[in-house]
Image (cartoon, grey):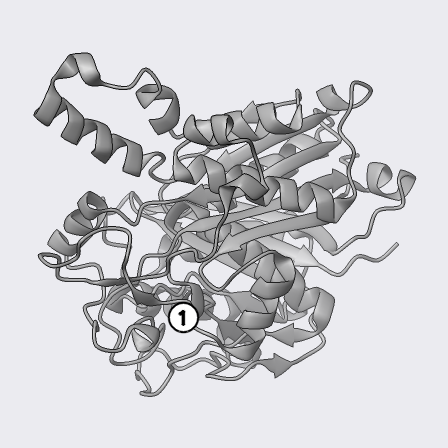
Amino acid sequence: MSNRVVVTGMGVISPVGIGLKDFWSALVAGESGIDKVTNFDVTEIDSKIGGEVKDFNVKDYMSRKDAKRMDKFAQYAVAAAKLAVEDSDLEINDSNAEDVGVLVGSGIGGMETFENQTKRLIERGPGRISPFFIPKMISNMAAGQVSIQLGAKGPNATTVSACASATHAIGDALDIIRRGDADVMVTGGSEAAITELSYAGFCSMKALSTRNDEPEKASRPFDDERDGFVMGEGSGILILESLESALERGAKIYGEVIGYGMSGDAYHVTAPDPEGDGAARSMQMAIDNSGLDIEEIDYINAHGTSTPPNDKLETKAIKNVFGDLAYDLAVSSTKSMTGHLLGAAGGIEAIASLMAIDNGVIPPTINYEHEDPECDLNYVPNKAKELDVNVALSNSLGFGGHNATLIFTKYQQ
């Protein structure tokens, strides 16, 4: 029989707050973390807004020497992981290090390092490239650095599946513990792609919102006037632990991870399947994996990117799975406040889902002002809603047609 897996700690670095308490308080209050981009000169860029992490002091989490050898995405991952370990009251030492693994997803990796070193190559030649260029840039270094900083010697890997990366990471970590290959997994996602080249690329695709005069209102999932996503950055890390291990050390349990599903659209490199077939199959697989009936699900933390295609197809996918029950569900997109953290999105959204269960409050979809006839579910508009949430489902859908779904439930003995 497979191990039951619970969540015993969570750490967040996000545009709406650093640390679990500030993150959750902001979501419940409906506060936006979107503002003018300061990380680079936006003069010639169509989209000038983003969800930047504010007041992050890297020296709070690591030495200056270690920080200089990490891209920002790895710094965020290490910081969130240390917060999660502290929250879990988990001690990693020689006696258990091999039973603690790390699986952290990232969609892009060290984009800032890549850009800076490319400029150096052009301006100063190949002899001036940093010896840390490669180990700072590659996407697996969030997981690698978390493992090094924590001393975790168990299973160690990275998922790279665009905006589904963190959700795949958590789901794969779930399976690692279920089959007994680790007692604890430090898992989630990290991203720091608010850079000039990233923005230029997404703007070229017409994917980003250009509501530059009202940054805090730009991310408006399911709203009829949505015009693209708003990029965010940060990291969401969870401590997944076998129930036996958690009970043995008397850990606080936020909830249980009971379902994981994933699928492929096999449709297009960037556009989602307009019928939502892949997203629907991912949700159905997670439900089947959980052993629950569809009527037992109370809340869906939607992928909800604020792009015209995504919100429409996700709504359709939810209806395809839940039928008439879809209209009884609370569905919200916390991206309305945080922006879209790309490969890290599933990490902070898993945390939001678990906090909804733990606190009996569903975070809202802010900026919901104009009804879209094709998006007609209960999106918990503009204000948080008190609700006894026993089961929450979280979706992540990525470029390339990658779909991933997790299901969390209240812990019961």
Q: Tell me if I can see residue 190 in this picture.
A: yes
**Quadrant into which the C terminus falls:** bottom right
Q: Which of 168 and 95 is in front in this view?
A: 95
**Viewed as shown, does residue 116 lie left or right of 326?**
left
Instruction: Tell me the crowding category of disc 1: few under 14, some 14 to 19, or many 20 or more residues within 10 angstroms, Cα based.
Output: many
- The residue at 25%/31% (across/down) is 114
**Quadrant into which the N terminus falls:** top right
- The residue at 22%/27% (across/down) is 117
For label 1, the residue is: 336
Q: Which of 21 and 205 is in front in this view?
A: 21
Q: How many labels does the image show?
A: 1
Q: In which quarter of the image is residue 113?
A: top left
Residue 124, image x, y percentages: 12, 21
Hey, what amino acid is under mark 1?
Ser
Residue 232, image x, y percentages: 37, 56
Residue 225, image x, y percentages: 24, 80
Residue 152, image x, y percentages: 66, 25
**Viewed as shown, does residue 221 lie left or right of 293?**
left
Q: Quadrant of residue 71?
A: top left
In the image, residue 318 above or below residue 9:
below
Q: Residue pushed farthest bottom? A: 370
In the image, residue 390 above or below residue 277:
below
Q: Tell me if I can see residue 392 in this picture.
A: no
- The residue at 45%/80% (across/down) is 377
In the image, residue 142 above or below residue 154:
below
Q: Is mark 1 on a helix, strand or loop?
A: helix
